Amino acid sequence: MADLDDKKRTSRSKGGKHSKQQPRSKHRVPIIIAAILLSAALIIGVGWGVSRLLQPKHVDENAVPTSSGEVVTINDSVMGDIELQTVKGAEVNTYTAEGLQYEEDGTPAYYENGKKISHLGIDLSEFQGDVDFTALKNAGVEFVMLRIGGRYYGDEGGLYEDKNFDTYYEQAQSAGLKIGAYFFSQANCVEDAAQEANYSINKLDGRKLDFPVAFDWENIAEGDARTDKVTGDELTSLAETFCDTITKAGYKAIVYSNTSQMLIMYDFETMKDYDFWLADYREFPTMYYKFDMWQYSKDGSIDGVEGTVDLNLSFTDFSE
């Protein structure tokens, strides 16, 4: 330290340019320090920016993968950006809009590797009235989903049958169409779901089905309904009860669902092994999870049915 003090005293005693440069040397150290700090900040900032660019855009940066999957942010054109806790082992949708083509008659079809894998179908209830099933067959329809019945959404929640189910079944079978069925559910407890499944089984009375029996549980937008307070966990239990009861009777089962129910309400830890029939009326769905059937129109038209009818594509041939 003595040598340093001597150099300081020497510089102060000299005149000329050394005495003029001394004030500049006082500011040089802080300037250098500031430059070093600025450089460090730039390096850190560039590194952070690069890491952001390299980070997968669909993954929430604050999300932590769990044993059951990871949290991803997906963009759904119906629901917008939503965070989804994925379920390990649940199949992810691989269908893309590029695979959808239109036949000469204007009906859609889905192709993979140049091979058509989809099957055109409609779902029918007594509201369609008289149906020409031969004309449906000639229009390219391969399967029909027939309503067995339903439950009223008022407080009492009584069951009712579809008046045309028996007639539709016989005529569809005679026309050579593959047949599935659905029950319009307004269950709010597992006892209701079991009752609806058993009602469907009794109505089928051992008749052959090529396609599944669908659990069609829907929210009622108009007025109050007995299902308004059903939670996601409860709905999962309802679907599980209905489908398991149907399966034990020897029939295939499927869950009918729209986007919000499928992504938000259903617990896929439980439902990942069940088939899904997705209602989505856009040009092509962006559903994260795999689905087996797609109801692509609720007001379509086709030869054999007067007025509008629901149109469907099945990516699975359930009759195989």
Image: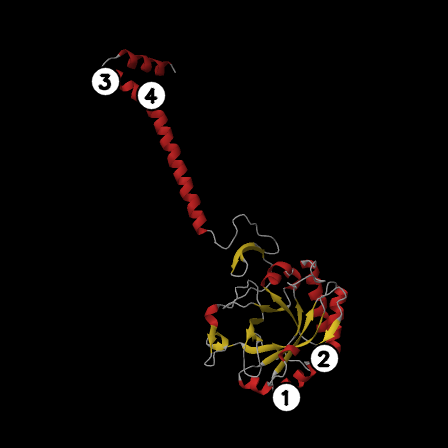
Q: Which quarter of the rendering shows the C terminus?
A: bottom right
Label 4–label 3 contact, CB within 8 A: no
Q: Is residue 16 left or right of residue 101?
A: left
Identified at 33% across, 23% down, the residue is: 27
For the residues bearing labels 4 and 1, Cβ distance under 8 angstroms: no
The amino acid sitting under disc 1 is: Ser
Image spot of residue 41 (x, y percent): 41, 37
Residue 222 shown left or right of residue 30 in the figure: right
- Residue at 40% x, 43% y is 46
**Element assignment for label 4:** helix
Hey, which residue is sitting farthest left in the picture?
Answer: 16
Q: What kind of residue is marked 2?
A: Leu
Residue 193 horizontal/vertical position (percent) = 73, 67
Q: Residue 3 falls in which quadrant of the image? A: top left
Residue at image mark 1: 174
In the image, residue 292 lies at what x, y percent? 58, 71
Secondary structure at badge 2 equals helix
What's the amino acid at mark 4? Lys
* Residue at 37 percent of width and 26 percent of height: 30
Mark 3 — residue? 17
- Residue 320 can be seen in this image: no
Numbered tag placed on residue 204 in the rendering: 2
Q: Earlier in the sequence, mark 2 or mark 4?
A: 4
Up/down of 277 relative to 65, above or below: below
Which residue is denoted by mark 4 in the rendering? 26
**Does 196 sit above or below residue 14?**
below
